[in-house]
């Protein structure tokens, strides 16, 4: 395909994605950067590049590329979620809050987004939002985080001087 059209960004993106799935991150990033040079608006190449950087634990670069994805495709809940997780890893809870809220509103099955939002809300002093998020975690019947959510709710209720709710 590249012999026929060496300026086809999607082909470079697909090769980069293939190398990523094989765990060959440097090669993946090489192809993905070529895709983005040819087509800076190619959100799929940004998405794949973000995954590569996240795999390398380079959350600043990953966040930049996830931000480029959500700017072009705001309805991609997993891109919103991953952007929020990058900011959590960078301990930028203010920046993390919005994409995680969007991801959870778009996909209520993303229980991990609600759990992360609960912790972020505690860090930001937003007790009511934290309570709401941990309650959302509890409403998901098959989540492994229920015990943690119960504990966090009890602590929040005790801190807000509501011992009756804490005992539930």
Image (cartoon, grey):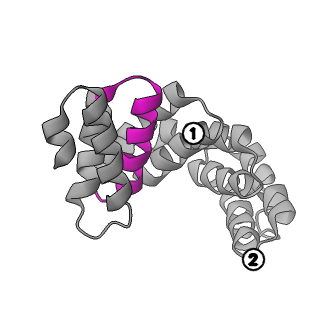
Residue 22's tag is: 2
Measure the C-alpha gap from mark 1 to mark 2. Answer: 27 Å
Give the image quarter of residue 21.
Answer: bottom right
Task: Please state if 120 lies on the left or on the right of 111 as rendered.
Answer: right
Residue at 40% x, 31% y is: 121
User: Would you name the residue on which mark 1 appears?
Assistant: 88
Residue range (magenta):
107-127
Query: What's the magenta bit mostly, secondary-structure-wise?
Result: helix
Residue 158 percent across, percent down from the top left:
27, 33
Task: Judge left or right: residue 46 versus residue 38.
Answer: left
- Sequence-wise, the earlier of marks 1 and 2 is 2
Quadrant of residue 15 in the image?
bottom right
Give above or below for 7 relative to 130. below
Residue 43: % across, % down: 57, 48
Locate residue 137, reporting x and y percent.
29, 54
Between 53 and 2, the one nearer to me in the picture? 53
Residue 162 horizontal/vertical position (percent): 18, 31
- Give the residue displayed 57% in from the left and 39% down from the top: 88
Label 2 CA crowd tier, 10 Å (few <14, some 14–19, many 20+): few
């Amino acid at each position: 395909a590249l012999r026929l059209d060496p300026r086809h960004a999607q082909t470079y993106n697909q090769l980069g994605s293939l190398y990523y799935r094989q765990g060959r991150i440097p090669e993946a990033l090489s192809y993905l950067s070529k895709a983005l040079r040819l087509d800076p608006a190619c959100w799929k190449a940004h998405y794949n590049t973000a995954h590569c950087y996240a795999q390398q634990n380079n959350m600043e670069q990953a966040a930049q590329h996830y931000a480029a994805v959500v700017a072009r495709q705001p309805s991609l809940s997993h891109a919103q979620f991953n952007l929020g997780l990058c900011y959590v890893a960078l301990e930028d809870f203010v920046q993390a809050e919005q994409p995680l809220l969007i991801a959870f509103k778009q996909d209520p099955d993303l229980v991990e987004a609600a759990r992360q939002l609960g912790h972020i809300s505690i860090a930001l002093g937003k007790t009511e939002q934290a309570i709401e998020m941990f309650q959302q975690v509890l409403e998901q019947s098959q989540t492994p985080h229920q015990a943690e959510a119960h504990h966090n709710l009890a602590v929040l209720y005790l801190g807000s001087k509501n011992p009756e709710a804490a005992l539930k």
